[in-house]
Image: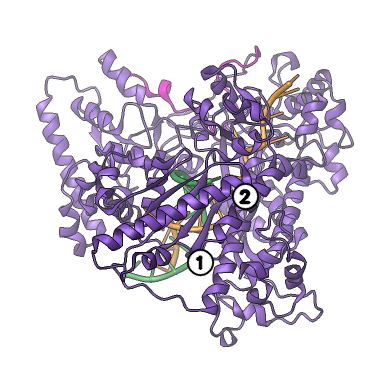
Chain colours: A purple, B green, C orange
DNA sequence: TATAGTGAAAAG
DNA sequence: CATCGCTTTTCACTATA
C-alpha cells in the first residue's frame, strides 16, 4: 500500500541537493581528513578549477559566450549539472560546484527553487538551464532576464493568461542581486516577526517574504470585525535595483470577505465578489481583473457539494479523517507499533531473552497481504475477483488508487496512481469503495495468527509484519545455529518454510485473503525475499544466493532508497545494486552522507544490522490536512487552525504526553499554480512553510496551541484563499502526569520513569525505563483497532491509575 | 568542535 | 459527478558559539 507514486504527480522538480564530486578519487578525502573538511573542500575547489582550465584550453575554438559569467547549478536540472558545467566552461564561463557564500557567482542555474533557497540565493541572478542552451545555440549571450526562474513561492502574480482573464502585468519583482542593504532589511524583518510571535503580541505590521512585500491584515479587535473586514492593506513597494524594477501591486491579496457572518461563501455571487474587490478603488476595472483567491473560493463553494467536502463544512475535520486512507494507515500503524512494543516490553522483562552470540544464523519472516485493501473488499464482491479491481474513493480523474488486485496490475495499474492515469491503462477498471472496518477486522485476525508463532514480532503496518523466528528454527535444526552443518541448516530452513506455509494457511482460513512470506537472514533479505514470494507465495533466500539475488536489483528496490537517492546514485553511474559494490565506502559516504552511504554499502552486500523488534519511543504527535482547504476569509483559516489544534490536543492526551515545541505547517498555492488544481479540492502545486516555536513550558492545551498556531499563520500573512494545507505538530514530548486521580504534583512517579532528556528533577529520575507510560497509554487508549480487545475494559483503566504499569495493563492473551 | 534547529526523504 | 494528498522517523545540512 502507500502512495509512493504520488511522487510522480507531485512536484517532481523538487530540489535534489547536489553533492556531486565529479572525479573519482575517494581517497582524497581520507588523505586529508585530519586537515579538516574545509581544507578538503578548498583543495577540491582548486582541483575543479584546474580541471575547468584544462577543459577550457581544449575548447578554444568555441566562442567565449560566457566570458564574464560564473555560474553555479542548484538542484535537479535538464540538462544535468555535469552537462551544464561542461557547456559553460567550454564556452568560456566559470563554474563553481560549491557555493560557499564568499566566492562570487554571477548566476545560479536552477529549474525551480524552494522558498528557503529563494532566500538563500536572493543575492544572485537565478536563471533556467535553457538560458545556457539557448545562448550557445544563438552563438551569443542572451539576456538572462528572459530566463528568470519564475518566483513561484511568493509572488502573487501569475504569468500569462488564466481562465481567459488577462493577467495584469508581467511579474518583474525579483530582487536585485546587489543588495547588501536588502539582506539586512530582510533579516531585520524576520527578526521582527519572530519577536512578534514570541511575545504573542500582535505585530502591528507584518512583513512578508522579502520579494513578496505583501501585506498582512492587521488584527481585528473581534472576530466579527475580522469577518467584516473587507481587505488587506495594499503595500506597493518599489525598489530601484541595479538589475530590476520591482513593481508589485497586491491586488490579489485582498480578502473578499465583506459579509458579516460565516455564510459569506454561500451567498457571494460573482458580481458580489467583483464588487467587493472593486470597491477597493485602486484596482483596474473589475472585469479586467483576476478574481482573488478568496473570491474564487467563494464561487467554488457555492456548489453545495464542494462546500460539503471542504473546510466550509463545520464537520470537515472529522469527516475528512473518517475517509482518509493515509490517515487510517498512519493511525493504525502507530497503534500497532505501540501495542506490539508494549507486548515485547512485557515479555523481555518477564524473561531475559538469551542473547545470541554473533554469527548465529537468523531467520526473519516478512509477512504481507497481497493487495490488502483490494483483497478484503473483494470478499464481498467475489464475482470481480478475476477482473481488474482497484480501491478508491471514486472514479474521478484525481481519485487515488489505494490498492489494486493483480489483474489490474497486469495493465500497469499501480498503488498511488491517479484514476485518470489508471483508466488510460485499463478502461474497464472496477472501482470498489474503502471498507476500513473490514480492514481492521482482517488485520486483527492476521496479527492473531502471527502472534501465535513463538518469535519476536514487529509491526510494519496494518497488513505487514516482521517475525524473527530464529530461535524456533535453530532449535529445529538441532545445532547451535553457528556451525556450518549442512543438515542443520537444511532443517532450519525447512522449519522456516513450514512456519510460513502454515501461517499463510491460517491467515487464508481466517481472512479469506492471501499473504506472502519472505524469509531471510535479516530484515533486508526478508524484504527482498518477499518480492520474489508475491503473489500468494513464499520464498526463502539461502545464504549462498544472497549476493546474486541482490546484484540485479535496482537501487530503489532496496528499502529506504527511493526516487531521490536513486537519482543521486545514478549521477555517479549506479543503477543496480551490484554497481554499488564497485564503489568504495568513502565514495558512497561522500555522495549520500555518512549513514546513508554506509547503509547502502552494507545493503549491497546483504548486510543489515537492524534487529526485529527494536524499541523506539515516540517523538512527535501531529495532525495535518492538505485537502479540501478552501477559505474565503482569514477567520475561517484561523478557526480551522484552531480545530486542528483541538485535534492535536486530543491526540496528545491519548498518548498521555504534552510537548514543549510546536511546529506549524503551511502549504500555500504556488504562484504559478492555477486556482483549481488537477485533483478536486486538492492542494496542487504548493510552497511549504514550516515554523516551530519553543513553548516555555510543555503543554497540550488546545487554547495555548491554537493561539500559537494562529499567531504563526498570521505572521506569514498569506491570503487565506491561497492556503491549501495546514498542520500542527508537537515535539519535545514529556509524559503527562496523571491528574485524573486527583493530586497533580509537579513530579509524579510515572513521569520519572520515562527517559526524557531533561526530567523535571533529574535527581529522582533514576533508572528510567524506556517506554512505560507512553506505551501503556497507547494500549489503554480507546483505539479503533485493538489486536485483542477482549480485555480492553481492563486495559482502559490504565489511564486513571496513578502508577501506570504496562505489564499489568497488557491484555492477558498477549502475554 | 559539539549541538540544535530545519528541511527533505521515505515508508505504508 | 467530484474527493478525502497522513503521520512519523531518520538523516543531512547549516548555523552557532
Residues shaded magenta: A141-165
Which mark's residue is nearer the viewer, 2 or 1? 2
The image quarter containing residue A578 is top left
Looking at the rendered image, the quarter that the C terminus of chain A falls into is: bottom right
> What residue would you read off at disc 2?
A443
The chief SS type of the magenta part is loop
Subunit that carries the residue with mark 2: A
Q: Nearer the viewer, residue A368 or A240?
A: A368
Q: Position of residue A306 (x, y in %)?
A: 77, 28
Q: Nearer the viewer, residue A524 or A504?
A: A504
Residue A152 magenta = yes
> What residue would you read off at disc 1?
A615
The circle on residue A214 is none
Q: Residues within 10 Å of mark 1 (few under 14, many from 20)?
A: some
Instruction: Give the residue at x 26% y 57%.
Output: A38
Residue A164 magenta = yes
Q: Position of residue A359 (x, y in %)?
A: 28, 67
Q: Is residue A393 above or below residue A50?
A: above
Instruction: Give the residue at x 58% y 23%.
Output: A387
Q: Position of residue A148 (x, y in %)?
A: 43, 26
Residue located farthest toward the top when viewing the structure as drawn: A164
Instruction: Give the residue at x 31% y 69%.
Output: A479
Q: Position of residue A684 (x, y in %)?
A: 60, 30
The answer to whether residue A449 of the structure is visible from this angle is yes
Residue located farthest toward the right when viewing the structure as drawn: A260
Q: From the viewer's perspective, is A597 left or right of A316?
A: left
Q: From the viewer's perspective, is A78 left or right of A155?
A: left
Give SS at disc 2.
helix
Instruction: Give the residue at x 66% y 82%.
Output: A749
Q: Is residue A349 above or below residue A608?
A: below
How many numbered marks have been drawn onto this rendered protein structure? 2
Give SS at disc 1.
loop
Amino acid at each position: 500500500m502507500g502512495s509512493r507514486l504520488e511522487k510522480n504527480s507531485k512536484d517532481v522538480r523538487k530540489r535534489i541537493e547536489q553533492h556531486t564530486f565529479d572525479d573519482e578519487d575517494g581517497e582524497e578525502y581520507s588523505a586529508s581528513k585530519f586537515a579538516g573538511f574545509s581544507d578538503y573542500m578548498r583543495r577540491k575547489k582548486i582541483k575543479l578549477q584546474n580541471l575547468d582550465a584544462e577543459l577550457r584550453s581544449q575548447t578554444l575554438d568555441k566562442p567565449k559566450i560566457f566570458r564574464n559569467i560564473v555560474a553555479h547549478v542548484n538542484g535537479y536540472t535538464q540538462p544535468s549539472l555535469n552537462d551544464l558545467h561542461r557547456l559553460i566552461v567550454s564556452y568560456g564561463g566559470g563554474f563553481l560546484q560549491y557555493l560557499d557564500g564568499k566566492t562570487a557567482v554571477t548566476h545560479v542555474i536552477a529549474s525551480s527553487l524552494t522558498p528557503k533557497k529563494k532566500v538563500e540565493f536572493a543575492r544572485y541572478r537565478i536563471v533556467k538551464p535553457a538560458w545556457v542552451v539557448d545562448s550557445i545555440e544563438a552563438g551569443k549571450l542572451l539576456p538572462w532576464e528572459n530566463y528568470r526562474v519564475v518566483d513561484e513561492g511568493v509572488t502573487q502574480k501569475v504569468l500569462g493568461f488564466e481562465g481567459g482573464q488577462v493577467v495584469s502585468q508581467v511579474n518583474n519583482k525579483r530582487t536585485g542581486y546587489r543588495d547588501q542593504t536588502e539582506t539586512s532589511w530582510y533579516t531585520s524583518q524576520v527578526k521582527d516577526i519572530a519577536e512578534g510571535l514570541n511575545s504573542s503580541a500582535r505585530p502591528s505590521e507584518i512583513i512578508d517574504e522579502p520579494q513578496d512585500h505583501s501585506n498582512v491584515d492587521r488584527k481585528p479587535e473581534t472576530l466579527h470585525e475580522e469577518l467584516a473586514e473587507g481587505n488587506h492593506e495594499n503595500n506597493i513597494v518599489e525598489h530601484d535595483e541595479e538589475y530590476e524594477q520591482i513593481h508589485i501591486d497586491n491586488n490579489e491579496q485582498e480578502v473578499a470577505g465583506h459579509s458579516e457572518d460565516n455564510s459569506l461563501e454561500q451567498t457571494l455571487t460573482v458580481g458580489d465578489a467583483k464588487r467587493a474587490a472593486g470597491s477597493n478603488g485602486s484596482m483596474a476595472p473589475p472585469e479586467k481583473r483576476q478574481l482573488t483567491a478568496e473570491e474564487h473560493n467563494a464561487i467554488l463553494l457555492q456548489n453545495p457539494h464542494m462546500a460539503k467536502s471542504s473546510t466550509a463544512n463545520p464537520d470537515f475535520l472529522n469527516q475528512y479523517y473518517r475517509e482518509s486512507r493515509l490517515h487510517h494507515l498512519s493511525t493504525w500503524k502507530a497503534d500497532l507499533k505501540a501495542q506490539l512494543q508494549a507486548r515485547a516490553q512485557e515479555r523481555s522483562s518477564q524473561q531475559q531473552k538469551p542473547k545470541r552470540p554473533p554469527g548465529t544464523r537468523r531467520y526473519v519472516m516478512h509477512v504481507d497481504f497481497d493487495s490488502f485493501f483490494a483483497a478484503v473488499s473483494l470478499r464481498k464482491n467475489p464475482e470481480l475477483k478475476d477482473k481488474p479491481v482497484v480501491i478508491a474513493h471514486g472514479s474521478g480523474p484525481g481519485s487515488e488508487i489505494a490498492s489494486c488486485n493483480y489483474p489490474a496490475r497486469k495493465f500497469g495499474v499501480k498503488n498511488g496512481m491517479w484514476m485518470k492515469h489508471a483508466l488510460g491503462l485499463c478502461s474497464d477498471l472496477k472501482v470498489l469503495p474503502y471498507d476500513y472496518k473490514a480492514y481492521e477486522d482482517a488485520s486483527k485476525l492476521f496479527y492473531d495468527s502471527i502472534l501465535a508463532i513463538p518469535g519476536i514480532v514487529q509491526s510494519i503496518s496494518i497488513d505487514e509484519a516482521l517475525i524473527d523466528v530464529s530461535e524456533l528454527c535453530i532449535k529445529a535444526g538441532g545445532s547451535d545455529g553457528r556451525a556450518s552443518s549442512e543438515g542443520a541448516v537444511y532443517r532450519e530452513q525447512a522449519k522456516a518454510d513450514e512456519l510460513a506455509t502454515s501461517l499463510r494457511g491460517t491467515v487464508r482460513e481466517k481472512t479469506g485473503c492471501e499473504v506472502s512470506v519472505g524469509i531471510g537472514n535479516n530484515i533486508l533479505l526478508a524484504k527482498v525475499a518477499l518480492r520474489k514470494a508475491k503473489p500468494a507465495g513464499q520464498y526463502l533466500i539461502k545464504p549462498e544466493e544472497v549476493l546474486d539475488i541482490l546484484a540485479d536489483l535496482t537501487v530503489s528496490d532496496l528499502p529506504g532508497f527511493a526516487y531521490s537517492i536513486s537519482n543521486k546514485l545514478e549521477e555517479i553511474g549506479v543503477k543496480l545494486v551490484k554497481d554499488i559494490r564497485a564503489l568504495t565506502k568513502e565514495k558512497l559516504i561522500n555522495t549520500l552522507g555518512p549513514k546513508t552511504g554506509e547503509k547502502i554499502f552494507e545493503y549491497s552486500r546483504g548486510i543489515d544490522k537492524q534487529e526485529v523488534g527494536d524499541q523506539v519511543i515516540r517523538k512527535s504527535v501531529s495532525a495535518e490536512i492538505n485537502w479540501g482547504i478552501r477559505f474565503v476569509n482569514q477567520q475561517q483559516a484561523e478557526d480551522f487552525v484552531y480545530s486542528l489544534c483541538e485535534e492535536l490536543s486530543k491526540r496528545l492526551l491519548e498518548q498521555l504526553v504534552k510537548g514543549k515545541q510546536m511546529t506549524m505547517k503551511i502549504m500555500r498555492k504556488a504562484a504559478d499554480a492555477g486556482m483549481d488544481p488537477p485533483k478536486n479540492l486538492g492542494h496542487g502545486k504548493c510552497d511549504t512553510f514550516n515554523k516551530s516555536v519553543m513553548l516555555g513550558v510543555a503543554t497540550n492545551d488546545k487554547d495555548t496551541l491554537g493561539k500559537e498556531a494562529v499567531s504563526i499563520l498570521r505572521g506569514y500573512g498569506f491570503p487565506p484563499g491561497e492556503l491549501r494545507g495546514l498542520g500542527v505538530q508537537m515535539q519535545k514530548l514529556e509524559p503527562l502526569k496523571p491528574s485524573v486521580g486527583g493530586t497533580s504534583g509537579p513530579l509524579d512517579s510515572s513521569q520519572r520513569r520515562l527517559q526524557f532528556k531533561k526530567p523535571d528533577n533529574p535527581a529522582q529520575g533514576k533508572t528510567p525505563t524506556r517506554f512505560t507510560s507512553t506505551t501503556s497509554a497507547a494500549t489503554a487508549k480507546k483505539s479503533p483497532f485493538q489486536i485483542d480487545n477482549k480485555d480492553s475494559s481492563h486495559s482502559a483503566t490504565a489511564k486513571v491509575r496513578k502508577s501506570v504499569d504496562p505489564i499489568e495493563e497488557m491484555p492477558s492473551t498477549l502475554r
